Image: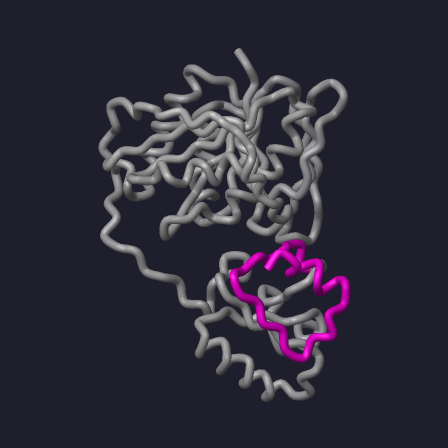
Amino acid sequence: MDKEIWVWAEYEQGEIREASLEMLGEARKLAGRLKAKVCAILAGENISGLAGELVAYGADSVYLFDDRHLKDYSIDLYMHIFSMLKKEHFPILILISATPNGVGLAPRLAARFKSGFSADTITIAVLPDGSLRINRSTFLGKAHGVLTFAANCTVVVTMKPGSVGLDRAVRSRKGDIIAMDPGEIPVSRTEVKGVVKADPKVVALDEAERIVAAGCGFRKNSDLDLIRNLSEAVGAAVGGSKPMVDKGWLPRSRLVGQSSGRRLSPRMFVGIGISGSSHFVEGMKDS
């Protein structure tokens, strides 16, 4: 059975999430060393038009489940889909972005498949014998741990959005889009009543669509009210450079830059009073 690297393709508002496209880029980098195909798993209702985007960002094949019963996200439904695929295919690696849905799905898949699991993964290396050496963040980012998984064993991995960056799409790439029959879909134990958009004031920076960031050009803490007012007007989250965090003017969760351990890629980024040091730019250059 051929080896495959699976990437869960999450989408919202009719577009593939950038976090999932990042996972495709990471899968593409590992595919040669693992001698594996990159396969995206896309499920939902009326989403066939999104499959080509996954090929452009690195998928060799897209397993497409387009069914009205898959309209809303449900762990039960996705567990059914992954389990059905696993009967006929061999995923050597399953990459899932650590979005709110992803962190709920990934450990359940690992338990169902009795496979290896690594959360908050930073880097993945393929050793000469085919085993995987994974560097992951622990203790809220204060330390790193190293995990080694034997060759030819399935491993489920989550990586934080923005941690590996977004590669460019190659529109000329060719891939297979495989329409799949979801079979007898189980009744979900949850029902989606509606979707409430997150408040930009409290949403994590790596989930924010817009960010307004402050730097040491602001001399007084009270001056940050200008940033807060602007962010509220445009529906953006507030971020800041390391000096703003070191002074205690902003919490560490609002830190932008290399020392935050993440690379942000919002649709809009506005920096005010920021010098633009390389450490800062490294954390937001994919915006």
Q: Position of residue 252 (x, y in %)?
A: 62, 66
Residue at image position (30%, 40%) is 46
Seen from this angle, which residue lies furthest top? 1
Query: Does 41 sit left or right of 28 as displayed?
Result: left
Query: Does 77 sit left or right of 160 as displayed?
Result: left
Q: How many marks?
A: 0
Whether the magenta-drawn stretch holds residue 167 is answered as no
Residue 8's place in the image compared with 265, above or below, is: above
Whether the magenta-drawn stretch holds residue 269 is answered as yes
- Quadrant assignment, res 185: top left
Q: Answer yes or no: is residue 178 visible.
A: yes
Q: For the magenta stretch, what is the residue range? A: 260-287
Residue at image position (51%, 38%) is 96
Q: Position of residue 170 (x, y in %)?
A: 58, 39
In the image shown, does 16 or 74 lie closer to the viewer?
A: 16
Q: Position of residue 206 (x, y in %)?
A: 54, 57
Q: Position of residue 99 (x, y in %)?
A: 48, 48
Q: Quadrant of the C terminus?
A: bottom right
Residue at image position (75%, 62%) is 279
Residue 20's place in the image compared with 271, above or below, is: above
Residue 233's place in the image compared with 149, above or below, is: below
